[in-house]
Structure formats: C-alpha cells, structure tokens
Image (cartoon, rainbow, N blue to C red):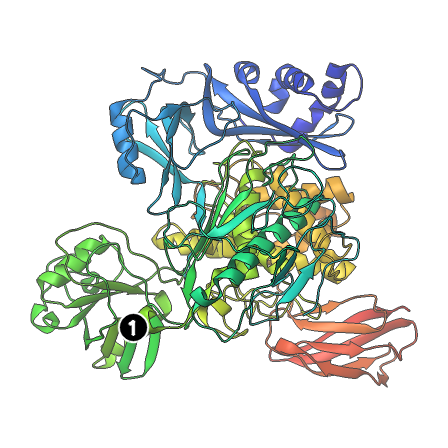
C-alpha cells in the first residue's frame, strides 16, 4: 500500500494546521501529523500510532528538516522500515520516502522475545563469531555505543519488498575479528534459520603540488603535516606538500589535534577529534604505534616514491592517513555531513547528534592485503577504516600465465576451498573437461575424458552446479589443478565460495573475457599454462597513500549514516543499493584536477596495482563521459544478473558512471571550481546534490529511488534549475522517464529507457535523449568551445562557418583522449556553425558567441 508522491503532497496543509501555525517541525508535531494523515501517507492507523522518531535533524542553514520514523508492530521494530518526512523550516512537507511494511495487520506473534540457543548457534555459524549467553539485549530506539568486543541482539520483524507478512526474528550484532566483518545476522524466531546477513563493514577488494586549500580556512594553533592533499590522488599524480593551517575553521574549529573543545592541541601524535590513526599490523583492532610530532606539532616524515617496501615509510603513511581522514571530514561537513547528520567526531561541538565516534583508522592493517574497508555502526558508535598493503605489480598475486599458443598473463580469482597457489610455478597443459552430458564442459558429473585430464590442469565452464562439485570431479579424474572459465557479464575475477575438505588441489577462476579466449584456444589446439602466486616477490604499495581509495572508504560511512537517518546502519543491505557508486563518485570528484575533461578516462586504484594513469584500475571500465570508453547503462546490471546476482562493485560502477556524467554536465553549465569547501562550480553543485539525495531517499534504495532523490534535492535547494540536465544524463545511461526499477532487492528485474519527461518535449510524445556522438560546451561561448567525444573515439577536421556558409579562421588545439578545444575569441558576437568528422561520419551543430 504505497501511494504516489503527488497524493502524499495533499497532506501539506494538514501538517501546518496540526501545529496551528507554520513553524519548524518538532517531534510532537511530526507524530501528530503522521497519525492524523495516515491515509494520505499510505499507512494504517495502527502503524501511524506505533511509529517512533528515530532521527530528526536540520541542515546547517535550517532550511530543511529531516525526520525518520521507525515502524513498530506490537512494540517490536521492523528492520529497515523507515518513513522519511522532509520539511521546510516553516513546517511544510516537501518530500516523503516510505519503507514501511504494508503487511503488519496479521503478523505472527513472537513465541518468546529472549534469544534462543538455536538462534545463537545459527548466528555463530553465519558470522564466524562464538556467540554465547553473554550476548546483550538492546532496544533499537535507545542511543548506545556498540563495541567490537561484545555481541548484541534485539527482537525485530523482518520484511522485504517481495511482500508477505513480516517474520518474527532476532537481529544479532557481532564483530568478527578474523575477517573485520561487523555482522547483523537476522535469525528467524520461528525456526532459527538465517533470514538475512547485513554487514556494517564494506570491503573494497579489487573485483577486477602546491597547497590547494582555499584562503578562507585558518589555523587555531594546529600542527603541520607532510602529506598528500586533495586533489592529488596518489604518488603517481603529484608530490607531497607540507600542510599548514590545514583544518577548516567551520568543520574543525579547534584544529585536528583537539579533543576537549578548547583552543590548543591535546595530542602530539596522530589523534584528534575526527580520527585516531595508528598502525595495526597485528590485526587486533587495538591502536598500535602512532608517530609523534615535534615540539611545534610538526609531522614531517620522509617519503621516497621509489620505495617499494611500505614498512620503510610507516610514519609517513600513518600521517597521511590522519590527514586524509581529517580533510574528508572537513570537506564532507561543508556539504551536509555535519554533527546533526551523524558525522564522525569524538566531541560534537554543537551539542547536536551523538559524539564518541571519531574514526579508528588502521594503517598497514595486518588482517589482509589488496583491500580496504570501512565499518559503520549507528551514530555514537566508533567506525573503523582499515587500509591494507597491496601488490603493486599489475597482475600480481594469484596468476595464470599462458605459455602457448600465445604469451600473456592473467590475474585470477581464487577459492575458499582447496590448496592455495604458492610462489612455486605449476606448469602443465590445460584440458577442457567432458562429463558426457549435453553441456559437457560444465563438469557436473563424472568426467568421461579422465585419461586426458590425469596429470593436467582441468578447464571447466562455470554454471549448473557448485564450484566444489566441479573441482572435486576433476580431482577424481586426476587433475593437478582447475581453472574455472567464468561466464558472468560482470567480467570480474571473483573468489569462489564453498567448503569441501576432500578437495586437495588448487582452483582458480578467470574472468569471462579471458575465459572465452582460453576456451577458443583449447578448441584450436594445445594450451600450456603456468599457475603461481607472484605476490611474495612483487613490489608493494600502500592504500594509506591513495587519496581516492580513502575517499571511497570514508564515503561508505557517509552513505550509511545518511540513508534512513544516522540511527540506522542497515539501510543499504539490498541488492541494488548504490554504496560502491557513491564511494567511487566522491573519490573521483575530490581528486579532479583543473584541466581534466569529462572524456578523460579515470581508473580507481591504478597506482596500487602498479598501472599508469591509462590503466583501468580495479573496475571493469574507466570512468568517462565518452560511451565508447565506458558503455555502461542501466541494463548492464540485469545482464550481469543473468547467471546470478550482480557483484556489488559492478552495481556501484554503473551508478557512479551516471553520477560522473551528471558531474560533468553541471560543470558544462556552471564551470569548475577547485575550492572543494565553498566553491560555486558545477562540481560543487553535483557533490551537494548527491549528498542531499542520500538524505531524501528511502531505506534500501534502488536506482530509480536514487535518481528521484537527486531530482528532488535539486528542486528543494536549487529551485529545480538543473532538472533538465539531470534528466538528460540519467536518460542517456538508460535511467530515463520510462525506466522501471522493479524490486530494489533484485538486480535482475530493472528495465532501461532513454526517454525524457514530456515536460521537456514540444509535443505530446516523450522525447528521447539518444546517444549523441559529441558533447559541445559551453554554449553560448565566451571564447572557447570544447568538443568531447561522447560516443565516438576521435574528432577531426574542425571547421567553423557563419550562417552564410563562409569559412572562418579558428585555432584548434587537440587535447587528451580525442577532445579538441576551439578558440573563438576572434569571432564577433553571433550565431555560428561548427562541424567536424568522427569515425561515424560528419557532425555539426550551432553555437552562440557572446563576450
């Protein structure tokens, strides 16, 4: 029972009337309105009366108030059932986002609300944590601090978009110190089975100079730090600087080394109100070594970009981690992730929100490699960022080397079962299995070509049966190792799940593209390969030095706290949630440099993998507004789900591609401003819209929910001035007016569309954006016009004519990635025609020259 937004807006007048005057919303007035207007809001009277406010806060300028109401059934909360109500400062309802269950009338009753032994056993198995009777019962609506050393539970109802009655359950919260996962395990109260696993820790393992601070910021006797600073992405893109007066006077008024809210530093090491940075090489989540500043609080430690052993620059790495977290705190504060909204601070100077949650940032963490993660419990509990050492050689780690018929090296995914690859090479022929069925290369039955497999490396296609069954069948046939040929459209090397103690041989998996190549080579003749782990001998890099990756991790904390309100940290547990996309987007936006273009391909983690700036990093495609470089559209998610759920990083990659297009569309309109704190450029507007959209969207949002929240944010904060531009970029990537999201709990049922709302058409038909070959901006032009490939590879033979057809002189400069810049300073004010050639044919458009 969900009503369309237009119907919900009918209740605006009722809210003001319920208060007797137009005034800022209060908890009492919100609850009164909620109960009096439950029919308009699409909920039952019982649900409206049982609901409790989980969060209520205003933006920094108090223009808008955000209220989040938790659904209860018979006094028991419904997990992730939050109703968002968003008001103007005068109390006018502006937007709603409903995640309440519509099936609360006849729910099964709890037999007992105290956790059962079966539930603890199920949670122990699911989380890998020994959960016993010492587990603490908590109340969801009570502000508290979650501790990594303890386990908690509360009775709840679990509901999802598939419909049906909410299920009585226990949500068990437990931190796994071996894996860094902070689990919410939802256990059925009825039969003790695991219903859902929600992780507060988001892991970002690869699935595939000069001071730029604005002048308005001032120091309050804080320290000096040798570190990288935004927009420098990593050592590959610039040099370290000595940062002085680096803290923002609004976000960190007492400096980065403060703890008590009184002028003057409180720590001489890398600890302060926003973050405590230290090493955690022994992976115990206890703060280890932190470097000390000198008597003047200078953290001036050496770093040599040629050094390949991160342990040699530990002091610098921890300092850089400290600086990055503080910069991210201060920048995000300016865009709305402040104390009221649930940001990360030990002491909340305003008294709003919950304090005691500065980030615990672990440098060179010993619990893993080639990874980074961020754990985000609710507001008032301490988050944790873990940064790991990486193998810097692209293709290092588990590796498949083809010796013949070609010579090439592939990075491969590994398995949770069987023997691990070592640095000792394993070289043999690669043989495709045959199990005698209609799909013989799947290897789901006893192999018929065991004589050919014995002593060789078996190749098996993915699908039909489990990984463990395939590998065990090959082992029985005498294979010394197995290579799984993936078929997922996500095209990533994954980690194969499963458990089988009988398997004693190694198994790896290659991505779809490389799998097809190997399959074709085996069809044509003999293939010889080598399997080995090259990580032991490869140079190392340190994610503590990658500013984009640290922004990515920090943004997981932002999106978790803002979605559903800061008291809820489970609101991004659905399949189509866009957490990885927001994180990539802010990483790109904060490391954008003056002179970059939208067409410029951007990778994620290039330096960490030992790639140059042209590498794709850890994503399938580089981010670019040019669809010949990055062709992703909304339909790519459903296609990736054809053989299973689309990987969360791939879902995020599609979302970030859309946001990156929007980012550049607004730069096209308003220009670029390098001031990340208070700039007025299109980049600043885009960053703010994305953050405001997180506050407005519903729990467990899908792409349509996210798009609509951004459009509403533009309506609220910018009077809708950018609605057409926003629609254009989303429609171009398949998230147009007629696109269908389906269930946000599924990645397989979305339908793309490329059309615009009828309001932007001159007739009664919906207008389509198409996939234009070139982007021309700005128009009107004050002296320069950029032509960027939007769906082609290059631009050539640029000509400018007046409307009579006369050719005019124009200086054309070829830029990176096929773009060109045309100098129009010599032209008089007026209308002109610009034309050029691409590999798809001739292209032309009109533009206006205005001084």
Say which quarter of the image contains residue 55.
top right
The one nearer the camera, 24 or 830, is 24
Asked whether residue 72 appears in the rendered view, the answer is yes
The one nearer the camera, 492 or 131, is 131
Q: Residue furthest left?
A: 451
- Residue at which label 1 appears: 400
Looking at the picture, how far across and down is residue 643, in whole percent? 34, 54
The one nearer the camera, 772 or 45, is 45
| Residue at horizontal 45 percent and vertical 34 percent from the top | 161
Looking at the picture, how far across and down is residue 178, in whole percent? 33, 46
State whether residue 542 is above or below residue 680: below
The one nearer the camera, 335 or 493, is 335
Give the mark count.
1
Looking at the picture, how far across and down is residue 667, in whole percent? 73, 60
| Residue at horizontal 12 percent and vertical 54 percent from the top | 502
State whether residue 486 is above or below residue 757: below
| Residue at horizontal 53 percent and vertical 62 percent from the top | 316
In the rendered view, does 667 fall on the left or right side of 297? right
In the rendered view, does 779 fall on the left or right side of 181? right
In the rendered view, does 484 fall on the left or right side of 681? left
Quadrant where the C terminus sits is bottom right
Looking at the picture, how far across and down is residue 527, in whole percent? 23, 79
Q: What element carries label 1?
A: strand
Q: How crowded is mark 1: few (under 14 residues within 10 Å), some or many (20 or more)?
A: many
Asked whether residue 634 appears in the rendered view, the answer is no
State whether residue 737 is above or below residue 309: above
């Amino acid at each position: 029972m969900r009503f369309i937004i237009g119907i919900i807006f009918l209740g605006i007048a009722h809210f003001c009337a319920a208060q007797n005057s137009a005034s800022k919303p209060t908890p009492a007035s919100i609850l009164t309105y909620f109960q009096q207007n439950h029919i308009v809001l699409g909920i039952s009277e019982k649900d409206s009366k049982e609901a409790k406010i989980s969060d209520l806060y205003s933006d920094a300028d108090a223009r808008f108030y955000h209220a989040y109401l938790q659904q209860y059934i018979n006094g028991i909360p419904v997990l992730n059932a939050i109703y968002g109500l968003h008001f103007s400062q005068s109390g006018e309802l502006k937007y709603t986002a409903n995640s309440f269950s519509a099936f609360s009338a006849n729910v099964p009753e709890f037999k007992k609300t105290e956790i059962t032994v079966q539930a603890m056993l199920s949670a122990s198995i699911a989380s890998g944590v020994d959960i016993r009777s010492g587990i603490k019962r908590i109340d969801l609506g009570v502000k508290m601090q979650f501790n990594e050393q303890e386990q908690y539970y509360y009775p709840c109802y679990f509901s999802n978009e598939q419909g049906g009655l909410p299920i009585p359950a226990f949500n068990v919260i437990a931190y796994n110190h071996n894996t860094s996962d902070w689990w919410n395990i939802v256990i059925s109260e009825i039969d003790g089975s695991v219903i859902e696993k929600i992780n507060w820790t988001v892991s970002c393992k690869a699935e595939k100079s000069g001071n730029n601070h604005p002048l308005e910021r001032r120091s309050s006797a804080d320290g000096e730090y040798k570190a990288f600073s935004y927009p420098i992405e990593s050592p590959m893109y610039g040099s370290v600087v000595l940062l002085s007066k680096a803290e923002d006077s609004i976000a960190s008024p007492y400096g980065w080394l403060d703890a008590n809210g009184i002028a003057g530093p409180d720590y001489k090491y890398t600890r302060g109100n926003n973050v405590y940075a230290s090493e955690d090489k022994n992976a115990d989540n206890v703060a280890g070594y932190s470097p000390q500043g000198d008597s003047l609080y200078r953290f001036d430690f050496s770093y040599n970009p040629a050094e390949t052993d991160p342990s040699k620059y530990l002091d610098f790495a921890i300092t850089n981690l400290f600086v990055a977290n503080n910069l991210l705190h201060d920048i995000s504060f300016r865009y709305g992730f402040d104390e009221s909204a649930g940001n990360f601070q030990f002491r909340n100077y305003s008294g709003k929100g919950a304090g005691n949650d500065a980030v615990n940032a672990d440098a060179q963490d010993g619990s893993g490699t080639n990874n980074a993660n961020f754990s985000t419990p609710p507001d008032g509990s301490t988050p944790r960022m873990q940064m790991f050492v990486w193998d810097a050689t692209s293709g290092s780690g588990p590796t498949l080397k083809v010796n013949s018929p070609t010579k090439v090296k592939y990075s491969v995914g590994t398995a949770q079962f069987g023997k691990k690859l070592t640095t000792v090479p394993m070289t043999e022929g690669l043989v495709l299995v045959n199990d005698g069925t209609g799909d013989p290369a799947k290897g789901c039955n006893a192999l018929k070509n065991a004589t050919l497999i014995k002593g060789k490396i078996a190749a098996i296609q993915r699908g039909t049966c489990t990984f463990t069954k395939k590998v065990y069948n090959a082992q029985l046939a005498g294979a010394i190792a197995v290579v799984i040929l993936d078929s997922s459209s996500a095209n990533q090397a994954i980690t194969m799940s499963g458990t089988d103690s009988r398997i004693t041989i190694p198994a790896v998996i290659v991505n779809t593209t490389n799998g097809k190549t190997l399959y074709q080579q085996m069809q044509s003749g003999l293939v010889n390969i080598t399997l080995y782990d090259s990580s032991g001998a490869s140079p190392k890099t340190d994610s503590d030095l990658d500013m984009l990756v640290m922004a990515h991790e920090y943004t997981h904390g932002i999106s978790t706290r803002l979605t559903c309100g800061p008291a809820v940290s489970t609101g991004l547990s659905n399949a189509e949630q866009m957490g990885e996309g927001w994180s990539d987007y802010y990483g790109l936006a904060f490391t954008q440099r003056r002179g970059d273009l939208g067409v410029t391909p951007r990778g994620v983690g290039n330096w960490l993998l030992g790639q140059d700036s042209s590498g794709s990093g850890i994503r399938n495609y580089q981010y670019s507004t040019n669809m010949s470089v990055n062709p992703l559209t909304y339909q790519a998610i459903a296609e990736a789900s054809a053989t299973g759920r689309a990987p969360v990083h791939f879902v995020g990659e599609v979302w970030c591609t859309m946001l990156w297009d929007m980012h550049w569309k607004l730069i096209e309109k308003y220009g670029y401003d390098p001031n990340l704190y208070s700039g007025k450029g299109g980049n600043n507007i885009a960053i703010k819209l994305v953050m405001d959209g997180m506050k407005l969207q519903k729990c467990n949002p899908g792409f349509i929910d996210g798009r609509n929240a951004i459009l509403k944010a533009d309506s609220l904060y910018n009077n809708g001035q950018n609605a057409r531009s926003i629609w254009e970029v989303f429609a171009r990537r398949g998230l147009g007016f007629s696109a269908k999201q389906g269930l946000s709990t599924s990645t397989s049922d979305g339908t793309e569309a490329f059309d615009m709302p009828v309001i932007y058409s001159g007739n009664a038909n919906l207008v389509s954006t198409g996939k234009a070959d070139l982007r021309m901006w700005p128009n009107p032009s004050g002296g320069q016009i950029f032509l960027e490939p939007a769906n082609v590879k290059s631009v050539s033979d640029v000509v400018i004519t007046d409307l009579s057809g006369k050719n005019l002189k124009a200086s054309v400069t070829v830029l990176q990635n096929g773009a060109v810049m045309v100098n129009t300073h010599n032209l008089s004010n007026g209308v002109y025609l610009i034309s050029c050639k691409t590999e798809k044919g001739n292209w032309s458009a009109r533009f206006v020259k205005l001084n």
